[in-house]
Image (tube, rainbow, N blue to C red):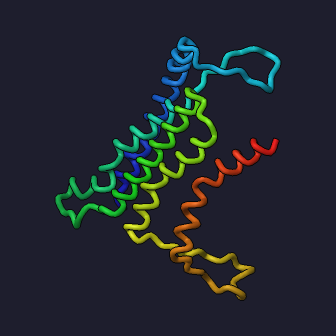
Amino acid sequence: MDYLPLCVNVAVSVLAGFVTFRAVPAVAKKLLAANLFGKDLNKDCDKRIPEALGVVSGAIFLVMHFALIPVPSLGCWLSKNCPGYPQIQLVQLLAALLALCCMLLLGFADDVLNLPWRHKLALPAVAALPLLTTYLLTEGPTTVLIPEPLRPLLGLHVHLGREGRLFQSNCLTTGYTVRWVRRRIG
């Protein structure tokens, strides 16, 4: 087993943790200076809490993942005995990173612009399009493993097909829909 990719991942993860640990306080000061802060409504004190700090750790996460893109093929490059780069995994990774980048932008925009709920409902669906498209084009499975107590009735697994793709797309906006309904009701 080749331990080089694992060692590189561990080293980059430790570096990302250190960079995040150093960057969050520095960016927090800049956000407070730019009047991007809120107040903790559940406490009596009037301490100002910087908003949009999630963008710091999210951006570092994305940068480190971008740096790790060539890691699966390190052994291939070093030994010159390369059967080929895993292109399907690369496409899936890039689609996931694009979706994360879109959601990071949504979180930042929501913190800074106080987006209305109608936009918060639409943007996750748009951000999920790269994931759904990639999953469809790379022929990702839509088979669900059945829990053991139900296996005598339904079998080991169920293939969902097109309905499974529709279910996946609906699951992506469910969290925002539930929050929107709760807010409307009371």
Residue that lies at the very extreme toward the left in this rendered image = 80
The reply, left or right, for residue 5 in relation to residue 22 is left
Along the line of sight, which residue is nearer the eye, 54 or 18? 54
The reply, left or right, for residue 181 in relation to residue 35 is right
For the N terminus, the image quarter is bottom left
The reply, left or right, for residue 97 in relation to residue 150 is left
Where is 120 relative to 20, above or below? below
| Residue 48 lies in quadrant | top right
Residue 92 drawn at (x, y percent): 39, 58
Where is 186 relative to 73, above or below? above
Along the line of sight, which residue is nearer the eye, 78 or 21? 21
Residue at x 64%, y 54% (from the top left corner): 174
Where is 48 relative to 15, above or below? above
Residue 128 drawn at (x, y percent): 49, 53
For the C terminus, the image quarter is top right
Residue 60 drawn at (x, y percent): 44, 34
Residue 89 drawn at (x, y percent): 36, 61
Number of marks present in the image shown: 0
Residue at x 20%, y 57% (from the top left corner): 79
Residue at x 62%, y 36% (from the top left corner): 116
Residue at x 52%, y 38% (from the top left corner): 106
